[in-house]
Amino acid sequence: MSTSPGRRYKRDYGEGHVIEDSVDFSRTDRESSVEPSHPPQDDADVVTSESSWPIVLYIPNLMGYLRIILSVYGLVSAIQQQASMALNTWIAASLLDLFDGMAARRLNQCSKFGVLLDILADNILRTLIWIAAIIESLKQDDERLIPKVCC
């Protein structure tokens, strides 16, 4: 299969994270040329268009920022004893995770930054849910340890 110089190829990093790489196959100097981890199998691996927006303003990245904000808001709601609000906020953040991946592929707005932002938002969400669970557990333990004094 012949390839033309400067073509862009998709690279799958697992968990649905696919980004594109630019590869110049016409160069003979192997040290200065970047080669893909796998050669393209067919034209389905070739990216034909790219977005003209700055990477930080890609729609999936904006959804990632919103996921981080919702995660923090869910922790604040949990601390303020608004369990249903916290749960609904975390469910919304989790659903956005599903939709930002679909949006990235459909709008052809996949980027390395987006992959890292998605992973970061996932880890922040999980960590804040665990922190909220630990805080709630400690509150319940404190209520059992402190003797109630009646007058």
Image (tube, rainbow, N blue to C red):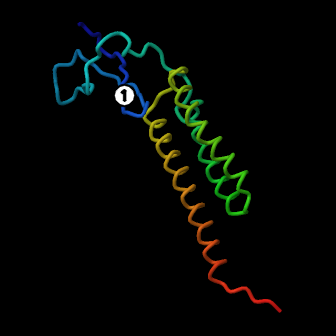
Give the x, y percent position of residue 122: 51, 45
Q: Of all residues shown, which one is farthest toward the bottom?
A: 151
Between 52 and 17, the one lying in front of the other is: 17
In the image, residue 42 sits, relative to residue 150, either above or below, namely above
Mark 1, Cα crowd under 10 Å, few <14 / some 14-19 / many 20+, is some
Residue at the image point whose x is 63% and y is 53% from the top = 72
Q: Is residue 149 left or right of residue 59?
A: right
Q: Looking at the rendering, in which quadrant would you find the N terminus?
A: top left
Give the x, y percent position of residue 34: 25, 27
In the image, residue 74 sits, relative to residue 143, either above or below, namely above
Q: Of all residues shown, which one is farthest toward the top?
A: 1
Q: Is residue 86 left or right of residue 13?
A: right
Residue at the image point whose x is 61% and y is 50% from the top = 71
Between 12 and 98, the one lying in front of the other is: 98
Q: Looking at the rendering, in which quadrant would you find the C terminus?
A: bottom right
Residue at the image point whose x is 24% and y is 7% from the top = 2
Secondary structure at badge 1 equals strand
What's the residue type where badge 1 is placed?
Asp
In which quadrant of the rendered view does residue 136 lie?
bottom right
Q: Of all residues shown, which one is farthest toward the right?
A: 151
In the image, residue 37 sits, relative to residue 50, either above or below, namely below
Q: Is residue 50 left or right of residue 26?
A: right
Give the x, y percent position of residue 103: 56, 26
Give the x, y percent position of residue 106: 54, 20
Label 1 sits on residue: 12
In the image, residue 109 sits, relative to residue 25, either above or below, namely below
